[in-house]
Each structure stands twice: as structure tokens, then as C-alpha cells.
Image (cartoon, rainbow, N blue to C red):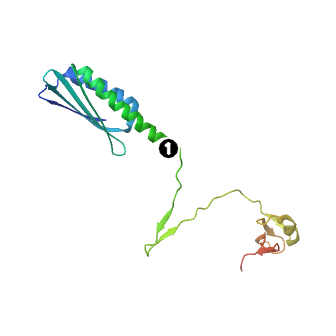
Amino acid sequence: MRLTLTGRHVDITPDIRRLVGKKIARLDRVLNTKAVSGQVELWIEKFRHVAEIHVHARGGHMLKGRAVATSWEEALSEGIDRIIQQAQKLKGKWQERKRQPRPVRRSLVGPDTRMVQVQRIIRSRRYPVKPMSLDEAAVAVGPAPDAFVVFRNSTTDAISVMFRRKDGDLGLIEPGA
């Protein structure tokens, strides 16, 4: 995560920079790589130390935390605590959304800029192509309405398909010459 540290009328010492890095590390444990960038502004109002923290997370989410305390450590801890609460809520939403698969829509844009639905080809299993006569294939089709048999015709030695038609009769598909 990229971190920008700004002090308004406050000198940013290495100790303050180390303290900010230590506190931001707590946020990194919650968001992992989902945090894109962060800005920390520090300033003093009379005797109060003010820390304002903005974290930009994945998906355009901004997490904001502002805290006022008597020391930098307290102000940064309170500000980070507020951001961690927001981050945990956001992370819960991300995880909840991941559990529900979304339907996949596949479409191609044709030359006439119409949307054409793409059909997927799903290979279900392999069928052994055995040499059979037409009578043997008719027996092998079975009574199911969507049954079929792929076989090698023993008389013509060509691959053929015999299937059960909707009206209950048998259909035969033979290759053309």
C-alpha cells in the first residue's frame, strides 16, 4: 500500500513515521492486498493531537478515521481502530458476495452489431463405435425417448447414428457420399 504522511505545522520525525507504519500494519492484516493507498494527516489543535486517516480500498471504497487525543500514539490507535471496523464490515461484504456464483452470460457482437448467444459444447463422455448391423443397433437403442447409438455399419463400413424419434419410431443418420 502506498502511504502518504503529511504534517500540518508538525515536523514528521522518524519516530512518528515508525509509529504510523506500525499502526498501519494492523490494517494490512485485515485488508491484505486490498488496500490501494493511504493518507495520514497529523496536526495539533492547542493541546490536542489530531490524526486523520484515509485509506482507499479495492472497488473505489474510501475508509476514513479521525481521532483526537493527548498523544500521537493514542490518536493514531483510535483512528486506525475506526478504519479497521470499516474494513472488517467491507471484507464481510466481499466474502458474502463471493459465496453466490453469478450466471455467466456469453455473447458475441456480430458484423451487424447484434448480440448473438454463444452455445457451449460440453463433452460428456466417449462412445465406443462398434461394428453392428441395423437390427443390432435397433435393439441397442433402448426405450428411452432421447436414446441413441453410434455404430459402424457392418455392411457399408460407415459411421452411423440410430436414435429414438419423438413419435417412438427409430431414425437413422448415415454419412453422405
User: Based on the displayed image, in which of its 4 quarters is residue 139 positioned?
Assistant: bottom right
Front in this rendered view, residue 80 or 58: 80
Whether residue 117 sits left or right of residue 66 in the image: it is: right
Residue 24 visible in the displayed image: no
Which residue has dot 1 on it? 98
Res 70 quadrant in image:
top left
User: Residue 147, how many percent across, how many down?
Assistant: 78, 65
Please identify the quadrant where the C terminus is shown. Answer: bottom right
Number of dots carrying numbers: 1
Q: Is residue 58 above or below residue 65?
A: below
| Residue 97 vs residue 115, the one in the foreground | 97
Vertical comparison of 145 with 29: above or below: below
Tell which residue pokes out farthest to the left in this image.
9
Callout 1, which amino acid?
Lys
Q: Badge 1: how crowded within 10 Å, few (<14), some, or many (20+)?
A: few
Relative height, residue 48 to residue 143 (above, below): above
Placement of 80 over or under 55, stated as above or below: above
Q: Residue at x 37, y 35 (%)?
A: 86
Where is the N terminus found, in terms of image quarters? top left
For residue 7, what is the image quadrant? top left
Q: Along the horizontal axis of the image, is 128 left or right of 5?
A: right
Q: Residue at x 50, y 69 (%)?
A: 116
Q: Residue at x 26, y 20 (%)?
A: 74
Q: Which type of secondary structure does the marked residue at label 1 adopt?
A: helix
Q: Is residue 119 visible?
A: yes
How far from the left and from the top, in percent, is residue 57?
34, 40
How far across and down, in percent of the image, does residue 135 sit? 88, 71
Residue 80: x and y, percent?
Answer: 31, 28
